[in-house]
Image: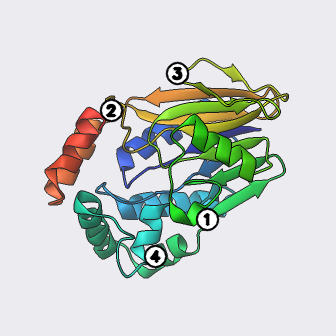
Amino acid sequence: MRVALLADIHSNREALDACLLHAHDQRVEQFVFLGDLVGYGADPTYVVEKVMALVRKGAIAVMGNHDAAINAEAPLGMKGDAAIAIEWTRQQLGEAHRAFLRGLPLIARHPVSFFSHASPWAPLEWGYVSTPHDAQRSFSSIDSPLICCGHVHVQRLYHQADQATVGQFDPTEEMPIHLSAQRRWLVLPGSVGRPRDHRPASCYAVFDDRTRDLTYFRIPYEHFSASEKIRAAGLPESISNGILYGT
């Protein structure tokens, strides 16, 4: 089965549609959404409804911190632009959208895979997996051979053989990586809606569980349109600029 891993869409309609179209061309059979469907962007209703429809067809989705903040009394410690965007997003979503986000699980497990938005060892604390030490802690806490997370907004791959030191790999787009069964793997597919590596192109990854090949992709999309819609909605200009410049 070919599985698309998508994280941190952040209400970016243009980026999501570009990735879904590309995934269709890649003959993807299963979708996994690794949290943060909403926040920052100008199209939360569209994004939530699109993911809701895919979940009804069998897609997997887990909760991100921005998703959780929609139903919280306060935006979960968020400050500045993130908190402003959450308050705006709450006003756009209906009860059905809120209920869907509220009902998302923190984690999902398959026989050989583990999915979470943030740190696998304590997903509700919303910690980042951003160093080999964090990956080591993840491997020590979760027994699945394949762990997939979001939250970091960059594409990265960690691996470990037995109890050996964790290795870090920064992938090259469109170059398949064979995930050897003799190692354990932690996949960060990057952000669909707000990459933070100074490139605006959207990020996602495809894993083929038959060949055990993982491929990272960067997908150009109408980021100027997405940025302008954020500005037109009255959201902070820094968010709009982040879409333009990949920050």
Q: Which mark is residue 98?
A: 4
Q: Which residue is mark 3?
A: 173
Q: Amino acid at mark 2?
A: Pro
Q: Mark 2 against mark 1, which lies toward the viewer?
A: 1
Sequence order check, earlier mark of 2 and 1: 1
Distance (Cα) linking label 4 and label 2: 29 Å
Residue 13 % position (x, y): 37, 50
For disc 3, the neighbor class at 10 Å (few under 14, some 14 to 19, many from 20) is some
Distance (Cα) linking label 4 and label 1: 16 Å
Distance (Cα) linking label 3 and label 1: 28 Å
Q: Mark 4 against mark 1, which lies toward the viewer?
A: 1
Residue at image coords 20%, 41%: 241
Residue 191 % position (x, y): 45, 42
Sequence order check, earlier mark of 3 and 4: 4
Residue at image coords 17%, 55%: 236
Q: Amino acid at mark 1?
A: Leu
